[in-house]
Structure formats: structure tokens, C-alpha cells
Image (cartoon, grey):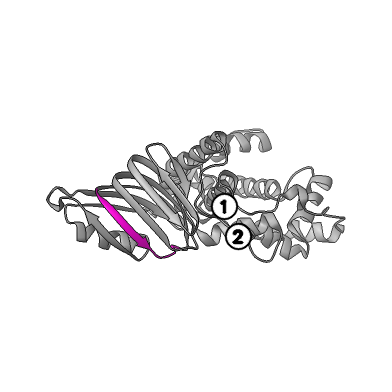
């Protein structure tokens, strides 16, 4: 199959060519360069699929740049050199090992010197969608600005999520080719952004009680999941179809089904994979990993474990008939 992941490698010793690449890749900006252009080196390696990207940049000169709002969420780790960024009253100075989220809404002033960066991108729409689900509002209440992780533990959590996205999703063409896996990966990364960096999001514990949910609404939710499990689904979409709120729906699933809406969705997708494995001809080249990816499971080992727990046998045994 064609690799659905977009991989870009850019190396140049021309500062103007590097700036053109940065404008095309990130956002419009004006830059002043300081130093010897004869010794300039720029190196970029980008891996992208859908709204996700894991990228590395190295720029050998000292630069002062004024950039337009990116309207995309970038999380930056300094791997070498120094980086100073400011947006409004928020300012950060970072050195090797430091990690921060950028302000997606505000113009930015950035200064760096012989810098190497690791950059993770996630579409702003995905972050706002997850924030809206958590807040149960019509629009997102999260407002990100330049900030470091809320704790070292959350920073380690973020890095673990990025390793998973980079290796198990973007590093696996079969997984990256699955719209379900890409959608789940985008939601996971967006959730990790909101869990790792401070923002003005209301705490769930302060929200009102979800209240009682009529059995008919729960049945509508389950029927909607059953009918649409083969495509990307969000909690808000399921709740809208059930004509209720996300929190009320979560409460109802926990009370009546002893699971969550996403847990029920996972069960339905496992059943879909089970049917596909039963119907497949093992001599045709069908693989367990291909079926797993089709139903949104990026990690073959985790899929096999969940499959065995639900059906009492391994997926490979089902495929062999």
C-alpha cells in the first residue's frame, strides 16, 4: 500500500531558502538573521499525517522573528541552543531539555541562537474539539498560551504519548492509513496537550451533576455506535445523536453498562474485527494487523490482548479458522 505518511527532509546552506521553507511549513513571519551566512546550515525532518506531525529542526544562525498566529498547536522542546519566545505579556526563555506549548492565537516574537528543536503539531480544531467535549459547552473553553508543563510527571506523560504517536502511528504505514487510528491518535494527542499544559479550562469536578438519563437515550447512543463504529466517532457526536450531554451519557454508561461510551465503542470495534477475521481467507494475504488497523487498533499486541479477553482466543487463531 502507499505510505499515507508525509515525510519531508530539507537541508540547505542558503538562509533565504530556509526562511521560505519555514514560512510554508509553519506561519508567515519576518526574520532578521545575525552572523556569518557563509557558515549557515539548516536541517529539517518532518513526519506528518492528517492533523499530526512530529518534526525536528536545526538552524545554525542567531535569528529574531516576528510571526503571525499559527492557528495550530505546537509543542516545542529545545534540544540544543537557546530559544526565547513572547506573546503579549507571556515570555519564556528555554535551553536544552525545556519544553513548552506555543500560543496558537497570538502573534509571536521569537529569538534563537544555533538552535535544535523537536516540534509536535496538532490541529487546533482537534484540541478545541476535545476541550469542548470536556467542558460540555458549544465551544471550547480551553485557552492555551506560552507555558511549560504543569509538572515533571505531566512532561514525562507527554513525551510517552509522543513516542507512541511517532512509533506506533506515524512509524507504521498500516496504522497511519487507518482513519480510525488517526482520529484516535489526534484525540489522544489533543487530550495530552490539555492534561500537560496549563489553560483556563473548567475542572470537571466543578461542573453540575450529570443528572438522570432516560433508557431511550442510552439505547439511541448504543444504536448510533453500533451503526457507525467503522468510522471516526467522538463522544460529543454520540451524545448529540442520543440527544443528551457527554457527561450524562458517560454517567449512564457507567451506571447501566459498567463501562464508558468509548469502552462500548471499543467492544463493538472488536466485534467487527472478529467478524472480519472469521470471514477472511488466510491464504489471500489478509493479516491480523491489517484487520486491527481497519478497526482502529494501532498496537497489534494490545489488540491481541483485548481480543483474547473478549473472545477467549487469539486473533491469529480466529484467522486460521
The answer to which of 218 and 200 lies nearer the viewer is 200
The answer to which of 104 and 250 lies nearer the viewer is 104
Crowd class of label 2 (few under 14; some 14 to 19; many from 20; radius 10 Å) = many
Q: Position of residue 32 (x, y in %)?
A: 26, 59
Q: What is the distance, in whole Å, between disc 1 and disc 2 at their CAs?
A: 9 Å
Residue 262, disc:
none
User: What is the secondary structure assignment of the residue under circle 1?
Assistant: helix
Q: Is residue 263 above or below residue 23?
A: above
Crowd class of label 1 (few under 14; some 14 to 19; many from 20; radius 10 Å) = some
Q: Are marks 1 and 2 in contact (CB under 8 Å)?
A: yes
Q: Is residue 171 above or below residue 27?
A: above
The answer to which of 74 and 255 lies nearer the viewer is 74
Residue 76 in view in this figure: no
Seen in the image, is 272 located left or right of residue 137?
left
Q: Position of residue 33 (x, y in %)?
A: 23, 56
Seen in the image, is 183 located left or right of residue 251?
left
The image quarter in which residue 157 lies? top right
Q: Which stretch appears magenta?
A: 61-70
- Residue pictured at 84% horizontal, 61% vertical: 216
- Residue pictured at 61% horizontal, 57% vertical: 142
Residue, far left: 38
Residue 187, disc:
1
Residue, far front: 89
Check the picture and name the quadrant holding the C terminus: top right
Name the magenta segment's main secondary structure: strand
Residue identifier under label 2:
129
Sequence-first tag of 1 and 2: 2
Q: Tell me, yes or no, whether the highlighted magenta stretch contains residue 68.
A: yes
Amino acid at each position: 500500500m502507499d505510505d499515507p505518511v508525509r515525510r519531508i527532509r530539507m537541508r540547505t546552506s542558503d538562509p533565504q531558502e530556509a526562511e521560505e521553507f519555514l514560512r510554508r511549513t509553519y506561519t508567515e513571519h519576518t526574520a532578521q538573521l545575525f552572523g556569518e551566512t557563509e557558515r549557515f546550515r539548516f536541517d529539517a525532518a518532518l513526519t506528518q499525517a492528517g492533523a499530526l506531525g512530529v518534526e525536528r529542526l536545526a538552524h545554525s544562525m542567531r535569528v529574531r522573528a516576528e510571526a503571525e498566529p499559527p492557528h495550530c498547536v505546537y509543542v516545542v522542546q529545545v534540544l540544543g541552543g537557546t530559544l526565547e519566545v513572547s506573546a503579549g505579556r507571556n515570555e519564556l526563555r528555554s535551553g536544552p531539555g525545556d519544553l513548552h506549548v506555543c500560543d496558537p492565537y497570538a502573534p509571536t516574537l521569537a529569538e534563537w541562537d544555533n538552535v535544535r528543536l523537536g516540534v509536535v503539531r496538532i490541529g487546533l480544531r482537534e484540541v478545541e474539539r476535545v476541550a469542548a467535549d470536556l467542558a460540555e459547552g458549544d465551544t471550547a473553553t480551553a485557552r492555551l498560551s506560552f507555558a511549560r508543563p504543569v509538572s515533571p510527571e505531566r512532561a514525562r506523560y507527554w513525551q510517552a504519548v509522543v513516542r507512541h504517536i511517532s512509533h506506533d502511528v506515524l512509524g507504521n504505514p498500516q496504522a497511519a492509513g487507518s482513519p480510525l487510528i488517526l482520529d484516535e491518535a489526534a484525540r489522544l494527542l489533543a487530550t495530552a496537550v490539555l492534561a500537560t499544559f496549563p489553560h483556563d479550562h473548567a475542572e470537571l469536578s466543578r461542573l453540575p451533576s450529570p443528572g438522570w438519563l432516560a433508557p431511550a437515550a442510552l439505547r439511541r447512543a448504543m444504536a448510533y455506535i453500533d451503526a457507525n463504529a467503522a468510522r471516526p466517532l467522538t463522544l460529543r457526536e454520540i451524545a448529540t445523536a442520543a440527544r443528551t450531554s457527554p457527561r450524562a451519557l458517560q454517567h449512564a454508561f457507567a451506571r447501566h453498562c459498567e463501562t464508558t461510551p468509548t469502552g462500548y465503542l471499543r467492544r463493538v470495534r472488536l466485534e467487527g474485527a472478529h467478524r472480519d477475521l472469521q470471514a477472511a481467507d488466510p491464504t489471500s494475504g489478509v493479516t491480523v494487523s491489517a484487520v486491527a488497523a481497519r478497526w482502529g487498533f494501532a498496537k497489534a499486541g494490545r489488540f491481541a490482548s483485548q481480543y483474547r479477553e473478549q473472545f477467549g482466543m487469539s486473533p491469529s487463531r480466529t484467522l486460521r479458522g
